[in-house]
Image: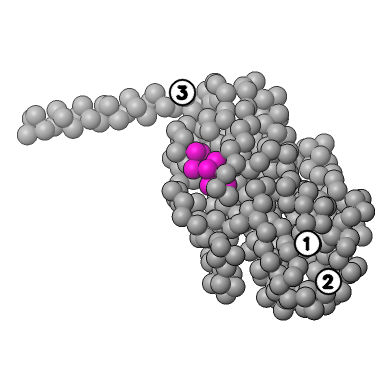
Amino acid sequence: MKGFNAVVRMATVGMLMGVASSVPAQQDYPNKPIRFITPFVPGGSTTIVARLIGKKLIESWGQQVVVENRPGGNTAIGTEAAARSPADGYTILLASSGHTLLPQLQPVSYDPIKDFAAVATLAKTEIVLVIHASVPANNLQEFIAVARSRPGQLNYATPGAGGIQHLGTESLNIMAGIKTQHVPYKGAGQALTDLIGGQVQFYLISGAAFVPQSKNPKLKAIAVTGDTRMPALPEVPTFAEAGLPGFELKSWSAVLAPAGTPKPIVDKLSREIAKYLAQPDFREKLVSQGMDPFISTPEQLAARMKEDFAKFARIIKTANIKMEN
């Protein structure tokens, strides 16, 4: 029994020493560069917001923040890299609203909920229905009429199969009673380029990605999600105004960390990001890019991710969406 007690005491002392040694590390955070993984191709709105946050963190904390684009696998490659990284706060992930969607459509090696610690939301943006100028329609109802008259002939772009735009367009097909063909790309940039070129006829694109191209004469924006019009696109009616109430799709971005990241570090990151999102100049930069600053606590973000997972599951079942579509 004495031997057993001695072992217990040694184990307890070891645990206490481990906890004690981790406390200074948490209080001293960060004391080395932070890797900020974005699982998307460079150049999109996700890279823009990641670099804005990274720049602010560098200014505040004096440590380098390296934005690392790790595209591939419909975001699975970069997301997996983050999930498998040490849970010490020195690797964080820029996730989008499709984070809980993709694992329901293709096999991945991580759990979108259990393998991550929610840190903070960054921004949200409405989704814009944009058609090529060659489509003989100037509003949503005319577009629906054209699509109905050409079943299976209109192609739509997405930045990748299994993403929120894929899900949203299939939902639009059901609600509008139309049939169109999916053309997935390896990122928003390629999808937008082919829409401009007329290789595809329409695209449910994030407002942030579309705003810089909003004056392009080859593109026509005919509807936007949300209850009100986007400040950056005041001339584009909402889906409800355009005659399709109930169609809802929203894109958001957030910061996640590997599961097990110490709560003090998660909270420190969350508070710092919220501080930036409340600054007028920072908010103005996001709004000018078609993004709406979006502040939430780690607990609120975790709840949103669980809600989205359940919502996407219902839509996938109803629309019978599969990756090969």
Amino acid type of the residue tagged 1 in the rendering = Phe
Question: Which quadrant is home to the C terminus?
Answer: bottom right
Q: Which residue is mark 1?
A: 202
Q: Position of residue 57 (x, y in %)?
A: 66, 29
Task: Find disc 2 in the rendering and name its residue.
Answer: 143
- The number of discs equals 3
**SS of the residue under disc 2:** helix
What is the distance, in whole Å, between disc 3 and disc 2 at their CAs? 61 Å
Seen at 46% across and 55% down, the residue is 107
- Please provide percent x and percent y for residue 277: 73, 41
- In the rendering, which numbered label is found on residue 24? 3
* Residue 205, above or below 278: below
Highlighted magenta segment, given as a residue range = 75-82
Residue at 71%, 30% in the rendered image:
56
Task: For marks 1 and 2, give the CA distance.
Answer: 10 Å
Q: Secondary structure under badge 3? A: helix
In which quadrant of the rendered view does residue 4 lie? Answer: top left
- Left-right relation of 156 to 110: right
